[in-house]
């Protein structure tokens, strides 16, 4: 089925330089995502996931699947483990992660923004406000330069900040036959969101729907059931990843199997988004909080209607 992938079918890419050592799987691309993405990071025991960095435009949301370790944020460390969510707002926290003795397995959700730098080829610089970068001073890969700088100093773990939240601590909403926990807002996300959703055995989650502007990614964590995508249906289980680009006009929904289903739902926050529910013929103008039912639905095919 188009836009449906499984993480077991994605070949991992090995990245290892100095204190950095990780297997990375790009899950978003095989699931057909466009403006957002999700990767799985499996960090070696005692090693670090990435160079210390702060995204200037993209907001990142991490979710710990397994293992344990430390979130390194602006020189301080905080203990993390399964079920923890970390939000890193754009142009704010410099961050990375260190795995504990049993390794660290995480999902990283993020936006795919266009690069916002100005290349000055004759001057040999890149202007990225508020800084100017020398484009030729050091030809080494950033990971090589990070490794040469050595491991970041890691002070004893501190009390966790507001941008690290366990899913059980997130704002909870019981909807129909599901439990929705708003991880993103609970941890301070601004431009994107992440929800932890549990659907009761044999029940359907959110109604069958599609979006005009918001893009969504779903990752099945536990259990399984059935995905309904337009007029098609497919079995799904833990590890399946579904990408739903905006404006496809193809609705989606999940129904849990006998053991129930738990998944993560990641999405953008677009104020002009419209959601359509074909089973009930309802339209949700989400930016203004208006829901209405259509009396008649006609798709314009390029010819005037009678």
Image: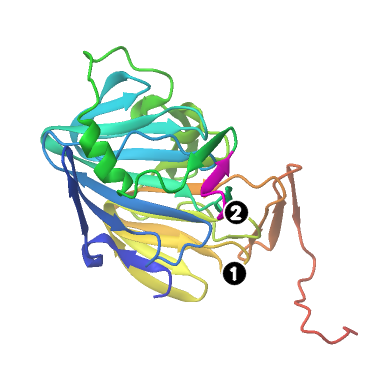
Query: Quick check: 128 left or right of 74?
Result: right
Q: Residues within 10 Å of mark 2 (few under 14, many from 20)?
A: many
Residue 167, image quadrant: top left
SS for tag 1? Answer: loop
Query: Quick check: 275 left or right of 35?
Result: right
Q: CA distance from mark 2 to mark 1?
A: 11 Å
- The earlier-in-sequence mark between 2 and 1 is 2
Q: Mark 1 sits on what residue?
A: 248
Tell me where residue 159 appears, x and y as whole percent.
31, 12
Does 285 lie within the magenta span?
no
Of residues 13 and 268, which is closer to you in this image? 13
Could you tell me which quadrant the N terminus lies in? bottom left
Identify the residue at horizontal 25%, vertical 44% (top origin): 144
Q: Mark 2 sits on what residue?
A: 214
Identify the residue at horizontal 44%, vertical 40% (top origin): 60
**Which residue is situated farthest in the right direction here?**
306
Of residues 122 and 290, which is closer to you in this image? 122
């Amino acid at each position: 089925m188009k836009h449906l992938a499984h993480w077991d079918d994605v070949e991992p890419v090995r990245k290892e330089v100095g204190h950095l050592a990780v297997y990375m799987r790009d899950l978003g691309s095989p699931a057909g995502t466009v403006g957002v993405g999700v990767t799985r990071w499996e960090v070696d025991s005692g090693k670090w996931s990435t160079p210390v960095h702060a995204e200037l435009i993209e907001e990142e949301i991490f979710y710990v699947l397994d293992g344990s370790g430390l979130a390194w944020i602006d020189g301080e460390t905080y203990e993390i483990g399964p079920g923890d969510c970390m939000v890193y707002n754009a142009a704010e926290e410099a961050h990375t992660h260190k795995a504990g003795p049993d390794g660290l397995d995480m999902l990283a959700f993020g936006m795919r923004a266009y690069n916002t730098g100005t290349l000055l080829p004759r001057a040999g610089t890149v202007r990225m406000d508020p800084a100017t970068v020398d484009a030729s001073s050091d030809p080494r890969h950033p990971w090589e330069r990070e490794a040469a700088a050595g491991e970041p100093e890691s002070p004893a773990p501190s009390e966790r900040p507001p941008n690290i939240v366990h899913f059980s601590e997130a704002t909870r909403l019981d909807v129909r036959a599901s439990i929705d926990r708003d991880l993103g807002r609970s941890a301070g996300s601004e431009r994107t969101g992440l929800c932890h959703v549990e659907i009761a055995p044999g029940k359907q989650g959110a109604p069958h729907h599609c979006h005009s502007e918001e893009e969504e990614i779903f990752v099945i964590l536990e259990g399984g059931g059935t995905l309904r995508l337009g007029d098609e249906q497919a079995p799904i289980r833990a590890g399946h990843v579904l990408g739903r680009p905006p404006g496809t006009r193809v609705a989606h929904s999940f129904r849990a199997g006998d053991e129930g289903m738990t998944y993560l739902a990641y999405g953008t926050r677009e104020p002009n988004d419209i959601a359509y529910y074909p089973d009930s013929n309802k339209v949700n103008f989400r930016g203004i909080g208006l829901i209405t039912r259509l009396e008649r639905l006609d798709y314009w095919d390029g010819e005037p209607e009678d």
